[in-house]
Amino acid sequence: MITDATQFWDEVHAARPATAPRPNARLVEIVSDLPPGDALDLGCGNGGDARWLAGRGWHVTATDISAVAVQRLAGVRITAVRHDLRVSFPAGEFDLVTAHYLQSPFELDRAGVLRAAAHALRPGGRLLVVDHGSSAPWSWNQDPDAHFPGPAEIAADLALDPAGWTVERAASPTRVATGPDGQTAEVVDHVLLIRRTA
């Protein structure tokens, strides 16, 4: 059993094909109508979201704990940097911070990371958090007792001052997802969209 987070995620990404993956469905749904600016992709993985954002004119900083994931974005119009979010956070101010499925079998102060993300927003900027709300048959997490915090619970954990941030969307929609071998399953996404107002 792997006990090191970096090794775990390096092996996960090394096992995946190096081809450019599709962007996450919720990113496309929510961000398509936003004007481009500076974006931060937390846990960029194989870079589908970062590439999609860059293709739409965003200046993207993509970060992941996995050097394998970060190296695959080298040479693309994206600043790809390795960060272990348990100990460091990318510098800068952003108009959009995305965190898709930033869930790990290793200890991570998610609320602290997402709070730092909210504080890295410029006024008017948005934090988009999309989490698993259920386990797909191909997920690494098959624990039947796993708890998937809903968007209201995630927002409460962030404890952001409502004078400075507002929740624009908190929902748990379903969609049909396709696994690595082409199998499909209905899954739940927990979607939280927060805008910095001041």
Image (tube, rainbow, N blue to C red):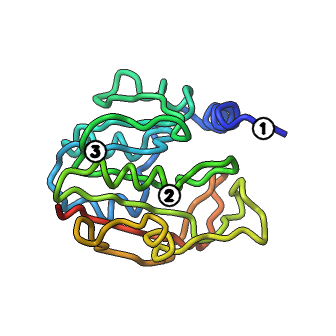
**With respect to residue 108, does 111 lie above or below?**
below
> What's the distance in space between the residues labelled 1 and 3, CA to CA?
31 Å
Between marks 3 and 2 in the image, the one whose residue lies nearer the viewer: 2
Whichever of callouts 3 and 2 sits on the residue coming sooner in the sequence is 3
Residue 186 shown left or right of residue 77 in the figure: right
> What's the distance in space between the residues labelled 3 and 2, CA to CA?
20 Å
Whichever of callouts 2 and 1 sits on the residue coming sooner in the sequence is 1
Residue identified by numbered label 2? 111
Q: Given the image, on which type of amino acid does mark 2 rest?
A: Ala
> What's the distance in space between the residues labelled 2 and 1, CA to CA?
22 Å
Element type at marker 2? helix
Neighbourhood count class around disc 1 (C-alpha, 10 Å): few under 14, some 14–19, many 20 upward: few
- Pick the residue in front: 119 or 70: 119
Element type at marker 1? loop
Tell me which corner region of the image, top left, top right, bottom left or bottom right, holds residue 197.
bottom left
Question: Pointer 2 and pointer 1: residues touching (CB < 8 Å)?
Answer: no
Residue identified by numbered label 1? 3
Residue identified by numbered label 3? 39
Q: Given the image, on which type of amino acid does mark 1 rest?
A: Thr
Query: Residue 72 appears at what percent x and percent y?
Result: 48, 27
